[in-house]
Amino acid sequence: MKNNLKELSFKRGDVVRVKCVDFTFDGQGLAKHLNRVIFVPSLLIGEEAEVEILYRKKDYDIGKITKIITFSPFRINPLCKCATACGGCSFQNLDYQKELEIKKNLAINTLKTVGKISFKFFSPKIIGMDDPIYYRNKMQIPFGYDKQHRLVYGLYKYKSHDIVPINECIISSKEHVSILANIKKLMLEMKIKAYDEDLEKGVLRHVLIRVGKASKEVMVVLIVNEVNFKNKKNFVNELVKLNPEITTVIYNYNLRKTNVILGEKEEVAYGNGYIYDYLLGVKFKISSKSFYQVNHDQCEKLYSLAIQKAMLTKEDDVLDLYCGIGTIGLIAAKYAKKVQGIEIVKEAIIDAKENAKINNINNINFLVGDAKDVLLKKSYDVIFLDPPRKGLDLSLIKQIMNSHPKKIVYVSCDVGTLARDLTYLTKNYNIDSIDFVDMFPRTFHVETVVLLSNRTAK
C-alpha cells in the first residue's frame, strides 16, 4: 500500500530527479522513479537529470529534461538545432561510434531474448556511415499552421501531430532546403492554404521530395486536398523557375480524412513523372510510390553484404521475395543463373520490368502477387528475403522451408520480427552469420542481414 501511495505522490507537471539506466527500443532514455518507468527523450545512459513529467500513462510516464546534473562522456553537441524538439532522430546528441555500439547491442539482445539465438560461433559487426549527415534521399514534409496561424513546415514532434518548424534537416539531402523554402514563399504569394487537419480544409498537405544521389535528378510530389485550386499550374511553373534542379513535379490527390500521406490518384505536372538513380552500377527508375532505400551509400553496403553472404554461382536459381522495383534481384542477376522476383505492388513490378530492360538484364523475371500466395512452384538454390517491418507470414515460412533452398539471406528492418521468424526458420536452417548495417544514422533503426544454410543440403 505504501508503494502505491508513493507512486501517486508525483503527478503531471512535477519535476523529479532520475538516472537513465537503459534505452528503449526506439532510442528514448529509460529511467525509474518510485517504481515508475519514465521515458525521457535525449537522456543518455548513466546521466542524472531533473525531468518534468509531461504525460502519465497506465504503465509508464513520459518526461522531458529540464536540467542535466551528471553528463555522459559520450554526449555531444547536436548539429541539428531542432534535435530536442523534433521526433525524427533519437541520437543527435550521442557520439556516433557509441551510437553504433548501442544499436548493435540492442539488436543482439533482442535476437537473444526473442529468438533464443546463440552468438557462440560468430561475432556480428555493424557497418556504419563514413559521414552520417545529409543522407536521406526521400523526405515527406507536412505543411500546416502554428498556434499563431503562421504557415509552417517541418517534422512532427515526438508522438504528436504538432509540426516542429525546420528550415534544414541535418539527415536530409541538402536539395530539400531551398525547395521547401520556395514552396512556402509561393504559397504565401499565391494565397494557397495549407491543409488544416481539424477543420479538414485547405490545399497542401505534404511535400514529398526524392533525390537521385548518383543521378542528381529531383522529384517533387505535392500532396493536395483539392483537385482544382487557384494558381495550380502557375505554382508549379514558378517553383521550377526558382529551383531548376527539379526534373519532375507530381500532384498527388489525397481527399480523405486519413493519416496516410499519399492518395491513389496522381497527375504529372512537370517532367516525366519519375527519376533515375544508380546502385552498384545498375540503373533504377523510381516513381513517387516506389520503395527505394533512403540512404544510397549505406544501401550499396547493405546489398553488397547480402550478395556477398549468398556466395552466388552461375548455377544458382535465385528467388527475390518482396523485390520492390527489383533492386537486390537485378544486382544479383549478374552473379546467378537466373532470378525470379515477387512483389505485391503492381506499380513496383512495372518499374522492375522496365529496370531489367533498361539495364539489358535478361536472366530475371518479375511477378505480381502476395509472396505467401504465389509461392512456391519450384525449388530455389538461394532466397533473398527483404520483408516489411511486420516480417514473414507463418504460412510463407512453411512454404519456404518445404521448398528446401540451400541458402536464405534475410534482410530485416525490424530486429523484433526477424527474431520471431528465426525461431521457425532455425528448425531446419543453421545461422551462419548475422551482421548489421546502419541505414539510418541518428535514429534508432538498424538493418540486419542474416545468412541461413540448410542443414540437409548437400
Image (tube, rainbow, N blue to C red):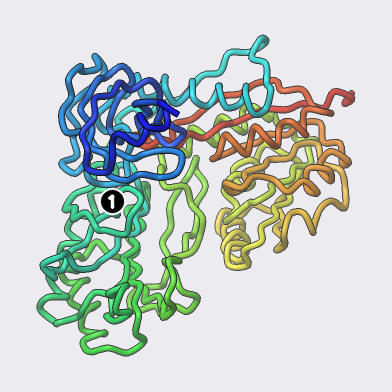
Measuring 62% from the left and 21% from the top, which residue is drawn there? 112
Above or below — where is 201 with respect to 409? below
Q: Is residue 97 visible?
A: no
Q: Which quadrant holds residue 226?
A: bottom left
Image location of residue 81, percent across then percent down? 15, 41
Identify which residue is drawn at 24% across, 20% down. Answer: 48
- Indicate the secondary structure of the residue bearing disc 1: loop
Left/right placement of residue 340 relative to residue 213 reads: right
The amino acid type found where label 1 is placed reads Lys
Residue 371 appears at what percent x and percent y? Answer: 73, 54
Dot 1 crowding, Cα within 10 Å, few <14, some 14–19, many 20+: some
Q: Position of residue 456 (x, y in %)?
A: 89, 25
Q: Nearer the viewer, residue 204 or 217?
A: 204
User: Which of the two residues, 64 or 310, is positioned nearer the viewer here?
Assistant: 64
Q: Position of residue 341 (x, y in %)?
A: 69, 52
185 shown above or below 117 = below
Q: Give the residue furthest to the top.
A: 120
- In the image, farthest residue toward the front: 1
Residue 239 in sight here: yes
**In this picture, is 456 found above or below 119?**
below
Quarter where residue 89 is shown? top left
Q: Nearer the viewer, residue 335 or 34?
A: 34
Indicate the quadrant containing the N terminus: top left, top right, bottom left or bottom right.
Answer: top left
Residue visible at 60% across and 59% down in the picture: 352
Q: Which residue is mark 1?
A: 157
